[in-house]
Amino acid sequence: MVDDEDSNVVVLERLLRQAGYANIHGTTDSRMAIPLYNQISPDLVFLDLHMPDPNGFDLLEHFAKQRPEEGMYVPILVLTADITPGTKLKALALGANDFVTKPFERCELLLRTRNLLETRFLYRELAEASERCQDLGHRVLEAETSSRLLLEKLTRLGEYPEFESMLRS
């Protein structure tokens, strides 16, 4: 989580821990967001928008650019006191997956968190299944190639009369 207000980070950490979530990392220094993101590979990012440079919009752009390279879905939940429609649209257009205004309702935030994490984990399962299918496809191809080579060798052996006599005995 990235928010320049220490009290917001503390409240959110406490709320998530009480709900049973672990491995929660937060920073009030937006300059640390990218190194922290790269270090911990988060399952979900909570992001404030209005912070000193880089602001939340800058971070959204950065995280959105990383997604295709990583090939993984890492949801971003924007938490902001800015309720203007333009802000919400801009955040969603830049790659935010959900948007909650402060002050937030505990139950709503926890449900949105659960939904985003569930999607994250389903996406991860799909990627792992796809990888297993590709691996299986490679093995099938190798087996087909080996079978074809063996059949070719057996065919060539059948051309020798002494091999034919060995088969009869």
Image (tube, grey):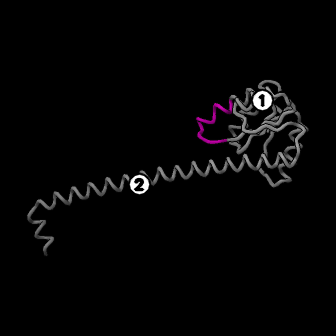
Q: Secondary structure at mark 1?
A: helix
x, y percentage for residue 132? 51, 53
Q: Is residue 43 left or right of residue 48?
A: left
Which three-letter amino acid code belongs to the residue tagged 1? Gly
Identify the residue shown where x is 62% and y is 42%.
72
Q: CA distance from mark 2 to mark 1?
A: 46 Å
Quadrant assignment for the C terminus? bottom left
Identify the residue shown where x is 63% and y is 33%.
66
- Which residue is the site of mark 2? 139
Q: Which of disc 1 and disc 2 is earlier in sequence?
A: 1
Identify the residue shown where x is 73% and y is 32%.
92
Using the image as rendered, state which of residue 37 and residue 85 is in the foreground.
85
Quadrant assignment for the N terminus? top right
Q: Report the residue that reaches farthest toward the front.
A: 85
Position of residue 136 relative to residue 12, above or below, is below
Residue bounds of the magenta highlight: 62-73
- Which residue is the site of mark 1? 56
Indicate yes or no whether the magenta region holds residue 34. Answer: no
Q: Label 2 crowding class (10 Å Cα cut-off): few <14, some 14-19, many 20+?
A: few
Identify the residue shown where x is 68% and y is 29%.
62
